[in-house]
Image (spheres, rainbow, N blue to C red):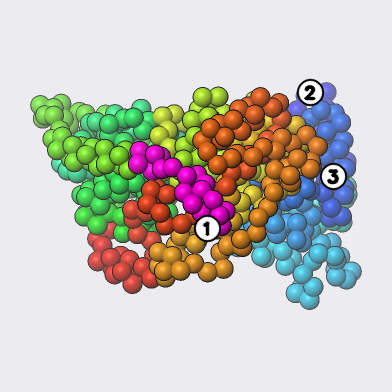
């Protein structure tokens, strides 16, 4: 605080809350204001008029939450989502699964029912006593009910701890009752505001690092599974892999941390992995997990490493670090632990004459990477195929996605993938060489995330042009982004791949039961007309050929604003129409086989 500011004064809860969030570095508020947040909204107005904060209205709470998650994911900026309680808050909480899954510390301010219990409030859950939303939301993430105005500092401190957690930031739900918001706090000490500084973990325990170095020096057929928790550590991972003669396998959200062109990078592994990534997992004898949560699809429902007998896990989260049996867990900051581990390994090798690692393991895995490259080339060479829904030949998803990725890289854009087939085909296809431009929300696979994420491009301190690659089902979850994009002056593009169905689920049904059911509608929608009905949107038809699609992307590039490109795509079982599946998953008809493997597994 400036020295001219009086330390103690009378202040409303709403004004103090806004000031407290500003003190923590929260200066962006994504709002869907309602009757439950009228006073807090007025406090936001006053701070906005002074230029202290930026307030952006949204048409939907899910959309606002996705945009907030994307802003943190891409730009690392702090943001708060503001809604009333009731349906609006529950929509925001549902979308907060993205924040939870990806470790993003987003603030949520909800206007709750009054504390006087004068009768059922609108949007409260009637007949269940007080604090029903508090009880419900507390099961999802950290929640605080500001029942007492004087507890505001405690609420802010708790929120700071949760959203700035050193190993796993999470969303924080702050419920502020309608009648509490305007209450005045006497003799409020402005110096008490928490600053929002994050604690630092530091490196893992030195004796465990030494133990891990001994294991790695004597290990063979080592696979390193890389998660997003290893972001920024690519060169260290490459050095480690070279030193121990290991290979690297990526999770979908970690693409770019290690360049795909690195000879030791085998690409993505998991139930929707790759030939090379899954081969390395299947044949490895020693597993090193770095910054990964070992999500079911990423480790084939715990069956991805059938020959592994020992695990070394580097992770900032102690619970995650102990996921597997027979684990040496290195709990600490990955970027600080890796150099110490590399140093320990190197010193042991030097004392033993530094014998070069046997490269037969790398040769075996590299041969599989060549097979994967051949498979990709065959898929990308696929010509348009006659489609039963479109009654004509249309392009396949991989062909369209690959062209879109080339366009994104040529123009230095950022790309977001929505859930479903487009997501899997995207991370299987992409050969990502650097961080910061390829984003796939694989933690909760929330339909509608990608198009909503584009709004972050105009709301970031350093604006960016984003491209959302989305299926028709995902796009229709949050189509109001077309309106909010104009209001927010967003520059970006939605590439809408339309197969008139939930393709990922249809494919799963066909593979397991031989027929798909209740996952398609066969309803033709003119998405170009829908987009062009909104003033300022550039709706373009993507056509049935690569030349037509290239022309559509060029139209989007030249348009100074927000575009939507509609592309009909093939769905069916024709050869080379998709990237395929290469792992296991504990669902449907596969359950008995997968669970039998889990019980047989050592780790």
Q: Which element type, helix, strand or loop, lies under badge 1?
A: loop
Residue 3 is labelled as 2
Badge 2 or badge 3: first in the primary sequence: 2
Left or right: residue 455 compared with residue 445: right
Residue bearing the label numbered 1: 388
- What's the distance in space between the residues labelled 2 and 3, CA to CA? 28 Å
Image coords of residue 367 (percent x, y): 21, 39
Residue appearing at x 33%, y 33% in the figure: 237
Q: Is residue 392 magenta?
A: yes
Which is more toward the observer, 443 or 376?
A: 376
- Mark closer to the observer (1, 2): 1
Q: Would you call the spot at circle 3 few (<14 residues within 10 Å), some (14-19), or many (20 or more)?
A: many
User: Label 3 near label 2: C-beta < 8 Å?
Assistant: no
* Vertical placement of residue 543 versus 500, above or below: above
Magenta residues (range): 376-396
Residue appearing at x 25%, y 52% in the figure: 282
Name which quarter of the figure residue 276 lies in.
top left
Name which quarter of the figure residue 528 lies in.
top right
Which is more toward the observer, 454 or 301?
A: 454
Q: Which element type, helix, strand or loop, lies under badge 2?
A: loop
Residue bearing the label numbered 3: 41
Q: Would you call the spot at circle 1 few (<14 residues within 10 Å), some (14-19), or many (20 or more)?
A: few
Residue appearing at x 87%, y 48% in the figure: 39
Residue appearing at x 73%, y 56% in the figure: 89
Q: Is residue 463 magenta?
A: no
Q: Is residue 488 visible?
A: no
Residue extending farthest front = 392
Which is more toward the observer, 498 or 274?
A: 498
Q: Would you call the spot at circle 2 few (<14 residues within 10 Å), some (14-19), or many (20 or more)?
A: few
Badge 1 or badge 3: first in the primary sequence: 3
User: Label 2 near label 1: C-beta < 8 Å?
Assistant: no
């Amino acid at each position: 605080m400036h020295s001219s500011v009086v330390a103690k004064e009378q202040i409303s809860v709403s004004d103090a809350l806004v000031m407290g969030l500003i003190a923590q570095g929260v200066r962006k508020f994504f709002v869907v204001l309602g009757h439950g947040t009228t006073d807090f909204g007025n406090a936001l107005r006053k701070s906005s008029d002074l230029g202290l904060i930026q307030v952006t209205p949204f048409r939907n709470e899910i959309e606002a939450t996705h945009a907030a998650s994307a802003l943190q994911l891409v730009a690392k900026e702090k943001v708060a989502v503001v809604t009333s309680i009731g349906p609006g808050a529950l929509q925001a909480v549902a979308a907060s699964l993205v924040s939870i899954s990806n470790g993003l510390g987003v603030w949520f301010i909800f206007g709750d029912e009054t504390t006087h219990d004068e009768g059922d409030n609108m949007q409260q859950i009637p007949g269940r006593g007080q604090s029903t939303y508090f009880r419900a939301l507390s099961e999802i993430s950290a929640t605080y009910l500001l029942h007492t105005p004087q507890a505001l500092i405690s609420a802010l401190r708790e929120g700071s701890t949760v959203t700035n957690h050193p190993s796993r930031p999470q969303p924080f739900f702050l419920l502020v009752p309608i009648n509490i918001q305007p209450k005045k706090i006497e003799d409020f000490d402005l110096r008490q505001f928490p600053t929002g500084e994050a604690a630092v973990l530091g490196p893992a325990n030195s004796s465990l690092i030494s133990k891990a170095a001994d294991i790695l020096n004597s290990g063979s057929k080592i696979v390193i599974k890389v998660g997003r928790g290893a972001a920024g550590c690519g060169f260290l991972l490459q050095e480690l892999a070279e030193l121990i003669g290991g290979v690297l396998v990526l999770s979908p959200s970690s693409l770019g941390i290690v360049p795909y062109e690195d000879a030791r990078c085998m690409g993505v592994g998991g139930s929707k992995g790759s030939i090379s990534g899954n081969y390395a997992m299947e044949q490895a004898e020693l597993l090193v997990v770095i910054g990964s949560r070992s999500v079911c699809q990423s480790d084939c429902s715990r069956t991805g490493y059938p020959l592994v007998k020992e695990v070394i896990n580097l992770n900032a989260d102690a619970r995650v670090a102990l996921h597997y049996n027979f684990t040496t867990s290195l709990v600490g900051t990955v970027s600080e632990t890796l150099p110490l581990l590399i140093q320990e390994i190197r010193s042991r090798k030097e004392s033993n004459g530094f014998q070069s690692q046997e490269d037969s393991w790398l040769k075996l895995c590299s041969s599989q990477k060549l097979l994967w490259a051949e498979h990709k080339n065959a898929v990308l060479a696929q010509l348009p195929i006659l489609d039963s829904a479109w009654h004509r030949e249309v392009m396949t998803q991989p062909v369209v996605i690959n062209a879109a990725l080339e366009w994104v890289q040529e123009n230095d854009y950022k790309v977001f993938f929505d859930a479903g087939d487009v997501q899997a085909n995207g991370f299987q296809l992409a050969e990502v060489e650097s961080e910061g431009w390829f984003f796939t929300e694989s933690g909760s696979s929330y339909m509608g995330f990608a198009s909503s994420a584009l709004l972050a491009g105009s709301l970031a301190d350093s604006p960016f042009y984003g491209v959302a690659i989305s299926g028709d089902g995902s796009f229709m979850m949050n189509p109001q982004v077309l309106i909010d994009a104009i209001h927010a002056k967003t520059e970006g593009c939605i590439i809408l791949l339309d197969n008139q169905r939930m393709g990922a689920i249809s494919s799963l049904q066909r593979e397991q039961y031989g027929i798909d059911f209740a996952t398609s509608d066969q309803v033709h929608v003119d998405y170009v007309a829908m987009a062009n009905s909104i003033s300022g949107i550039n709706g373009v038809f993507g056509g049935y050929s690569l030349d037509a699609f290239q022309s559509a992307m060029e139209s989007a590039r030249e348009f100074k604003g927000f575009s939507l490109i509609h592309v009909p795509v093939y769905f069916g079982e024709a050869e080379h129409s998709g990237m395929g599946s290469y792992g296991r998953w504990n669902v449907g008809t596969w359950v008995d086989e997968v669970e039998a493997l889990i019980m047989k597994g050592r780790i």
